[in-house]
Amino acid sequence: MTAIAQEQAFDPADPLHVPDPHPLFHRMREQAPVYRQVAPNSGRVFWFLTRYADVQRALLDPGIGRQLDRLPEELAAPHRRWENDALAMVRRNVFNLDPPDHTRLRRLITPAFGARAVAELERSVGRVVGDLADGMAATAAAGGEPDVIEALALPLPILVVADLFGFPAEDRALFRRWSDEMVAGRNGLETRRSGMKFVAYITRKIAERRDRPGGDLLSQLAEAEAAGGITRYELISSVFQLLFAGDETTVNLIGIGVLELLRHPGQLARLRAHPELIGPAVEEVLRYNGPVGHSRPLFALDDVDFGDAVVPRGDIIVPVLLAAGRDPAVFPRPDLFDIARSPNRHLGFGHGIHFCLGAALARVQARAAIGTLVRRFPDMNLAADPATLEWTDDLFLRGPRRLPLRLLG
Ligand code: HEM
């Protein structure tokens, strides 16, 4: 056994590693690519995958799933105690389901993310980004240091996703508050209380759409519910998941994208000289330092053989998307940030049947936000030492919490 494999208490998802997990992932990939960790509190066994081929395979293997009820009760029971009960009501959505329920729900929501829908949203994204950048310029003109996260990355995605459902602008502050409360809820009661407010809101909106259907996604889902294609529980859970899956991920992609360009002035200059590279540049951010560190933890429904180790049925498998992006077997010079890298088959949006449904929408927003900053603020600079930036404490949803800029030379 290798040195790293013996560190039983060592946790790759420890907040300590969130800002820069790459040296650790390299060590894991080299020494223990299928790394077994016993969680100290629960005793549950997690297996972290850091090789590209293993991550890809885990996300394609029907013998690895997301639903606890697919395990026999004696294997499911130890996990059930640790699943957050208060969040159970928002769990019946594509992200947490396997086929056939996954297939049925994904088919219902997919049209809302098609090329036409995204092209329509693209216009409003351009407008919103322009307005937010004006705000940043005004802050800088008044002698301030606008924060990319607060001034641009945070307001944009929730506006865009709410638009998809036809929710009014003034309600957006509510989603933000409920989502913050639910995620940060110090106990089950707090989480449940904000969850109930959300459920009441959606229930009201569904009734409105029944009376007066529109062209938005909620109207389509309400219609599907009436036709028996989706339950009320699944509908609410899906709206919740879409509102929040599309929010923090995008905030973090914009934040990390701007940060990496500022950390790599040569690449920033290259993008400024070749604005058409914004597409590949965003893909490179997703590979090099993507905002979603790993997929949803999965359950081994059978014993799964990864060559180096056999994961026993009932254990948890964590495909580390971020580690796959730096696998030298797939990406030459993986630690080099190259905005024109090609090919670039990163797994930053996942892989297989759960591949990110909002990928096109996320790309539109990230390209608009980062591209606009680069174009409008040629002298932008970080107004903080990158080494002291505070990050989120979660490898799953990672990104800098603040990113203050000096916009003037
Ligand atoms: C799934 C990343 C933005 C909706 C996923 C997955 C990843 C991902 C890695 C797969 C997770 C897994 O296998 O467990 C990202 C990133 C984003 C982003 C990096 C932005 C930078 C969005 C947006 C939306 C969205 C804007 C929608 C508004 C979804 C949905 C799923 C998903 C619905 C679940 C799909 C399924 O399970 O079939 N995303 N996402 N995402 N994402 Fe995104």
Image (spheres, rainbow, N blue to C red):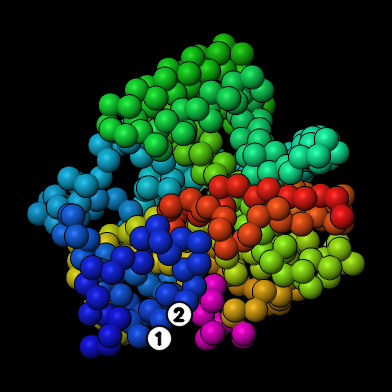
Residue 205 versus residue 217 in the image, above or below: above
Q: Can residue 403 be seen from the camera position used here? A: yes
Task: Specify the quadrant of the image occupied by residue 253.
Answer: bottom right
Q: Which residue is mark 2?
A: 26
Residue under the point 50% across and 27% down: 177
Residue under the point 68% across and 44% down: 147
Q: Residue furthest right?
A: 273
Rendered-image quadrant of the N terminus: bottom left
Q: Is residue 268 magenta?
A: no
Q: Which residues are magenta?
A: 325-333
Task: Specify the quadrant of the image occupied by residue 273.
Answer: bottom right
Q: Magenta stretch mostly in which secondary structure?
A: loop
Local crowd at mark 1 within 10 Å, few (<14), some, or many (≥20)?
some
Residue under the point 70% across and 53% down: 383
Q: Which residue is mark 1?
A: 30
Residue under the point 59% across and 68% down: 287
Q: Secondary structure at mark 1?
A: helix
